[in-house]
Each structure stands twice: as C-alpha cells, then as structure tokens.
Image (cartoon, rainbow, N blue to C red):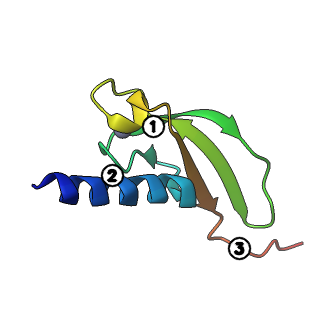
Amino acid sequence: MSSQMITVWLLQIQEEAEAGVVFSQRHGAICPACNQRAKIYSTRPWEGSVRIRYHRCSNPQCFLCRAGKTIKSVEEDVTGVETA
Ligand SMILES: [Zn+2]
C-alpha cells in the first residue's frame, strides 16, 4: 500500500467513526479500523427508534485508539412500532 492510499484509508475510517457504525446487540460496536469490539463510554437515551452510543477502541495497536478517537454507533430498534 502506498502512503497516499493509507492516508485515504485513514480518512475513510475516521469518517466512518464520526458518521456512526452499526451497533449490534450481540456484537456491540466494531472498531472500523481494527475490527475489534470498541468499549462503550457513553450511552444516550432512545430517541424514537434510534439510540446513539459513543465508544473508544482499546486496542493499543489501533490508530483510532492511539489517536483517542471517539467511535459513534447507532442502534436501531427494528421491531419498530410500539403496540398498546
Ligand atoms: Zn480499533
């Protein structure tokens, strides 16, 4: 990989971390850089059918971890409409 390609890749990863990755009940949020489960440090209340969480990667090899970057995750309640 050329250094230019690495730079593009790093930017894409950071964009993904800022835009939000998918939060899975089973797997949590996966760090877009190293594919390891990122630790939750903040959980927001449900807003409609969406819940936002903030994570930090704890993999010392990972550049998102080393940069202290926040990873946002989005959980969507797919069961959707509440039934009374
Ligand atoms: Zn990572």
Q: Are marks 3 and 2 in contact (CB under 8 Å)?
A: no
Name the disc covering residue 38, or none: 1
What whole-number distance in Å separates the C-alpha atoms at marks 2 and 1? 17 Å
- Image coordinates of residue 59 in percent, x first then y, are 34, 28
Judging from the image, what secondary structure is the residue with disc 2 in?
A: helix
Q: Compared to 49, does 4 lie above or below?
A: above
Residue 27 is at least partly visible in this image? no
Most foreground residue, 1 or 57: 1
Q: Which amino acid type is shown beneath numbered disc 2?
A: Leu
Q: Is residue 19 left or right of residue 81?
A: left
Q: Answer with the quarter of the image where residue 58 lies.
A: top left
Name the disc covering residue 80, or none: 3
Judging from the image, what secondary structure is the residue with disc 3 in?
A: loop
Q: Quadrant of ligand 1?
A: top left
Q: Is mark 1 within 8 Å of ligand 1?
A: yes
Most foreground residue, 67 or 39: 67
Q: Is residue 45 left or right of residue 38?
A: right
Decide which of tag 3 and tag 2 comes sooner along the chain.
2
Q: Are marks 2 and 1 in contact (CB under 8 Å)?
A: no
Q: As drawn, which residue projects farthest toward the front? A: 4
Most foreground residue, 5 or 21: 5
According to the picture, the residue beneath numbered tag 2 turns out to be: 10
Q: Is mark 2 within 8 Å of ligand 1?
A: no
Q: Nearer the viewer, mark 1 or mark 3?
A: 1
Judging from the image, what secondary structure is the residue with disc 1 in?
A: strand
Q: Which amino acid type is shown beneath numbered disc 1?
A: Ala
- Image coordinates of residue 12 in percent, x first then y, are 38, 60
Most foreground residue, 83 or 59: 59
Q: Residues within 10 Å of mark 3 (few under 14, many from 20)?
A: few
Decide which of tag 1 and tag 3 comes sooner along the chain.
1
Name the disc covering residue 14, or none: none
